[in-house]
Amino acid sequence: MTMRKKVGVLVAGLAALGLSPLAFAQGVGNLGDLPSGIPQAGPTGWLIGNPSAPIPVVRDPAGPKWIKLLTDPNGGPIVNPNPGTIYNLNETVLISGNLWWSDWHEEIITPGWEWTSTVVILENVLNPPAGLNIVNTPGSPTQGGTLEFYFDPLPPGTVLHIRKQLEYVGIAGTVHFGAVEVAQYPTPEPATMGLLAAGGLLALRRRRLRAR
């Protein structure tokens, strides 16, 4: 079988299961336990969890994204910040459940905001994770920026302390009124993706045999 045919069979197998590669691009398993509306801890930014009380996050290959709404100190909208205004976002999460993590993703859904180059991630509040690679994609007035962390697999029980900054890059004179929406999630490890794909192929072959 050629490589093109193999890829076609794989895609068909995933489709037969009602799955797609995008279905595995997110993975939070305890969404109901996670905070959603996050008021500013002060005029300079937001604080989510801390080293003594990290936020437990469970990775689930079939789960949704964790959506956070960053608001003003009173839970209201952020009103018309000046372009170049920077806010701190510090959060501490605990790898929970029984699955290891090898990445963490942060997407700004609200247009006109991006992550600055000031980014720190620490394993157990001490050192950066081994094998760390950070990909920071800038935002624009029409699209939010993304921040992606890749690292050697970390076991459940690991605490990740992440410090970064949000910058408003909207067009001067335009009106911004609302919360800043951010999606965060871990994704399945490559080995898990391979097992899921193999399962799709197996199910497809079994279905074809039954149809004969």
Image (spheres, rainbow, N blue to C red):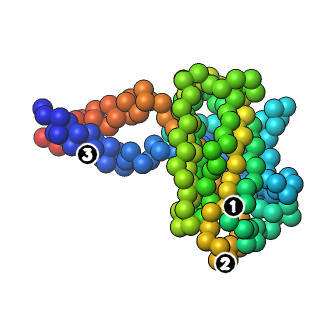
Q: Secondary structure at mark 2?
A: loop
Q: Position of residue 146 (x, y in %)?
A: 55, 50
Q: Position of residue 168 (x, y in %)?
A: 67, 61
Mark 1 highlights which residue?
84
Q: Residue at x 52, y 49 (%)?
A: 137
As rendered, which of 149 and 173 lies closer to the eye? 173
Q: Residue at x 25, y 45 (%)?
A: 12
Query: Please, what is the three-letter code of the amino acid marked with disc 1?
Result: Gly
Image side of residue 10 versus residue 60, left or right: left
Could you say which quadrant of the image residue 81 lies in?
bottom right
Q: Is residue 66 visible?
A: no
In this rendering, the label closer to the viewer, 3 or 2: 2
Q: In the drawing, what numbered circle is on residue 12?
A: 3
Disc 1 to disc 2, C-alpha distance: 13 Å
As rendered, which of 170 and 106 lies closer to the eye? 170
Q: Residue at x 67, y 56 (%)?
A: 167
Mark closest to the chain's N terminus, 3 or 2: 3
Mark closest to the chain's N terminus, 3 or 1: 3
Disc 3 to disc 2, C-alpha distance: 49 Å
Q: Is residue 105 visible?
A: yes
Q: Callout 2: few (<14), some (14-19), or many (20+) C-alpha neighbours within 10 Å?
A: few
Mark 2 highlights which residue?
173
Image side of residue 17 versus residue 109, left or right: left
Query: Please, what is the three-letter code of the amino acid marked with disc 2?
Result: Gly
Instruction: Relative to 194, say whether 130 is above or below.
Output: above
Disc 3 to disc 1, C-alpha distance: 47 Å
